[in-house]
Image (spheres, grey):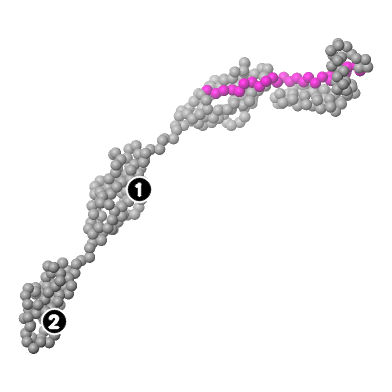
Amino acid sequence: MQTRRDKVRSAIAMNLSLCDVVTYPLLQAQRDLIQYYSAGTLDSALQELQEEAGTATAAAASGGTPSGTPPPPASNQPSNLTLSCNANSGAPAAVPTFSPPAGHYDSPQQITISDTSAGAKIYFTTDGSVPTTSSTAYSSPIQVSKTETVQAIAAAAGSSNSPVGSAAYTIGAPAAETAETAAPPTFSPVAGAYTTTQQVEISDTAAGAKIYFTVDGSVPTTSSTHYSGPIEVTKTATVQAIAAAPGFSNSPVSSAAYTIRPPAAKVTVSPTFSPAAGAYATAQQVTISDATAGAKIYFTVDGSVPTTKSSVYSSAIQVSKTETVQASPITV
């Protein structure tokens, strides 16, 4: 009896798997329960033994009932395993298809859903939920104006519901292709150390490029100073620049460091005297000279410090008494 009940239980489980549980008929459920109960009676147990021995098959082939076979179960206790359900229990309907197919589109799309199963009704969702026969019935193209996934099933007479078909649509203009980058600006004269103020020119090879620069150490942007002519660099500074041109993304920042260092002033060595300082018995003709070419020598003999307003040395000085000759070095 237990074996037969197991068979009935398996048949009920299959029946449920082929039906919509929500709409499983009450009367059908009652009949299935009666059948399960009947499978546990003595008559059903005897029939089970006959089936296992193969006698029931032989009796059906001969059209008679073998000797000793107990009477069939009472009509109010059905023992067959045939279960029925008002839901379709045949092969699944075809999976719905979508047109246009899933993909990336620049503008909203009208989505048509179709199915090859005869008389199929289509039910769909666009909110991510799994469609059932309680979902929206498809009747005309669906407007898809934003990124979303359309899912659908087909239900047809004589067939179980189809597997879920889905199509994901991305709506929106594709990302723009990355523009070519403008060439970094170049500088003339090149970066380096200079002894005088420099007029720095900036140029770029990109057609129609506009150049923006800074000299204060900040990173240049298109809001920085627009380059329109040579930049006067009067002190040590770093010039940074970018180029912006139609059809190009902005260039990388380029820079040039300029060191402005005036040359050290040339200073003459101290003038020399001949004869050298000392004590002499007679008057002396004192000659003053300097090793710096073109140097002018200024001198005094009265103890004051010589300046460029002092006497200019041009020939030997007559020293006829004790005194000090002073001469000044000169910057040229």
Question: At numbered mark 1, what does the secondary structure look like: helix, strand or loop?
Answer: loop
Q: Quadrant of residue 64?
A: top right
**Mostly what secondary structure, the magenta segment?**
loop
| Magenta stretch holds residue 97 | yes
Q: Which quadrant of the figure contains the N terminus?
A: top right
Q: Quadrant of residue 80?
A: top right
Q: Which quadrant of the figure contains the C terminus?
A: bottom left
Extent of the magenta region: 70-99
| Magenta stretch holds residue 263 | no
Residue 297 left/right relative to 12: left
Between 260 and 66, which is closer to the camera in this rendering?
66
User: Is residue 223 visible to us here?
Assistant: no
Q: Identity of the amino acid at label 1?
A: Val
Residue at the far top: name it: 63
User: Is residue 78 visible to us here?
Assistant: yes
Question: Residue at the spot x=82%, y=22% of the render?
Answer: 35
Residue 310 left/right relative to 100: left
Numbered tag placed on residue 107 in the rendering? none
Residue 291 position, x and y percent, is: 15, 71
Numbered tag placed on residue 253 in the rendering? 1
Residue 105 position, x and y percent, is: 47, 29
Numbered tag placed on residue 276 in the rendering? 2
Give the Cα separation between the discs numbered 2 and 1: 65 Å
Question: At numbered mark 2, what does the secondary structure look like: helix, strand or loop?
Answer: loop
Q: Residues within 10 Å of mark 2 (few under 14, many from 20)?
A: few
20 is higher (above) or lower (below) than 192 = above
